[in-house]
């Protein structure tokens, strides 16, 4: 369904030139859930933005269903870390907004909006405003809005990172259920390896800047998955073993010279 072919991305500013992505090659199949993990600054979000058409690659290309992606489009919807809801619109109107712009009639978009609010269990808050909701509820509204567009690909950029642990666990369960119902193609960027393994069919590990694909892991754990599963912990440990070296590279470039991996409590040693 989607092919990323030899994609490079260079950012140029007055002070420096940053090679963010280098020779990225990736194929995503229809209906697949792919998670991307890597250290800070490795280009995970940049890669997502290139796929979305929000960023232009410096080299290479992204092809979807045989057509090169050159701009943003309704076939690729992005869900960000912040819910980005319109504060002056009610929940139901936020969910309907993209469909309204697309020219869908009011009765039809209301029907679709209610369908997806039911899916995220928020119909009783349809007439509420975003400021009346918790952070987790706002993200569920954002998810309903993204699903309502019925895009071919849902691109999720750390959508649960700002939530507390309990709320995040609930949304993990909800997203697993929604994906099993819709079989939507999802590309999910996260720093959280447990989250990546819990949700995805495949986990892509990226290197420190410049970001390249270091390794892919196929996750064959049956669904629904539990965060406390020993099998899940085993796969997480394998991925952390690959990721640790890349995180250390970033830490060495950002911490004082007296820092070392052995003295750090930030990087747990895989068991």
Image: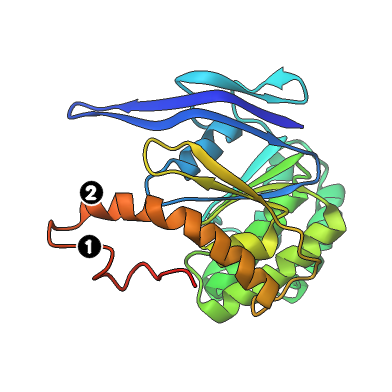
Quarter of the figure with residue 173: bottom right
Residue holding disc 2: 253
The colour style of the image is: rainbow
Looking at the picture, tell me which residue is in the foreground, 24 or 88. 24
The x and y percentages for residue 55 are 49, 30
Q: Earlier in the sequence, mark 1 or mark 2?
A: 2
The x and y percentages for residue 246 are 39, 50
Q: Determine whether, in the image, residue 186 is placed left or right of residue 8.
A: right
Of discs 1 and 2, which sits in the foreground? Answer: 1
Tag 2 secondary structure: helix
Residue holding disc 1: 260
Decide: few, some or many residues near mark 2? Use Cα within 10 Å; few <14, some 14-19, many ≥20. Answer: few
Q: Can residue 66 be seen from the camera position used here?
A: yes
Gap between marks 1 and 2, in whole Å? 11 Å
Residue name at image x 68 percent, y 61 percent: 199
Residue name at image x 66 percent, y 70 percent: 232
Q: Can residue 129 be seen from the camera position used here?
A: no
Looking at the picture, tell me which residue is in the foreground, 93 or 200. 200
The x and y percentages for residue 266 are 33, 69
Quarter of the figure with residue 185: top right
- Tag 1 near tag 2, CB within 8 Å: no
Decide: few, some or many residues near mark 1? Use Cα within 10 Å; few <14, some 14-19, many ≥20. Answer: few
Looking at the picture, tell me which residue is in the foreground, 152 or 29. 29
Quarter of the figure with residue 226: bottom right
Tag 1 secondary structure: loop
The x and y percentages for residue 123 are 77, 71
Q: Is residue 73 above or below residue 190?
A: above
Q: Which residue in the rendered view is the most extreme toward the front?
A: 271
Q: Determine whether, in the image, residue 265 is placed left or right of residue 93.
A: left
Labels in figure, total: 2
Q: Determine whether, in the image, residue 24 is placed left or right of residue 127.
A: left
């Amino acid at each position: 369904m989607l092919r990323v072919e030899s994609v490079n991305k260079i950012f140029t500013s007055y002070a420096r030139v940053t090679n963010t992505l280098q020779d990225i090659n990736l194929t995503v199949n229809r209906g697949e859930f792919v998670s991307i993990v890597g250290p800070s600054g490795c280009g995970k979000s940049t890669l997502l933005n290139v796929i979305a058409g929000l960023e232009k690659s410096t080299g290479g290309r992204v092809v979807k269903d045989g057509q090169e992606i050159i701009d943003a489009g309704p076939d690729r919807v992005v869900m960000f870390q912040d819910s980005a809801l319109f504060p002056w619109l009610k929940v139901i109107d936020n969910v309907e907004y993209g469909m309204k712009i697309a020219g869908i009639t009011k009765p039809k978009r209301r029907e679709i909006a209610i369908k997806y609010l039911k899916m995220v269990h928020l119909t009783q808050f349809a007439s509420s405003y975003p400021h009346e909701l918790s952070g987790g509820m706002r993200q569920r509204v954002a998810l309903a809005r993204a699903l309502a567009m019925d895009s071919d690909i849902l691109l999720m950029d750390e959508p649960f990172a700002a939530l507390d642990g309990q709320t995040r666990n609930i949304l993990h369960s909800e997203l697993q259920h929604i994906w099993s119902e819709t079989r939507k193609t999802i590309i999910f960027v996260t720093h959280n390896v447990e989250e990546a393994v819990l949700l995805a069919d495949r986990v892509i590990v990226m290197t420190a800047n410049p970001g390249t694909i270091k390794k892919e892991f196929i996750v064959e754990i049956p669904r629904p998955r539990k965060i406390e599963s020993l099998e899940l912990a085993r796969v997480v440990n394998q991925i952390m073993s690959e990721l640790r070296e890349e995180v250390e590279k970033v830490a060495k470039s950002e911490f004082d010279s007296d820092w070392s991996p052995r003295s750090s409590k930030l990087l747990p040693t895989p068991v």
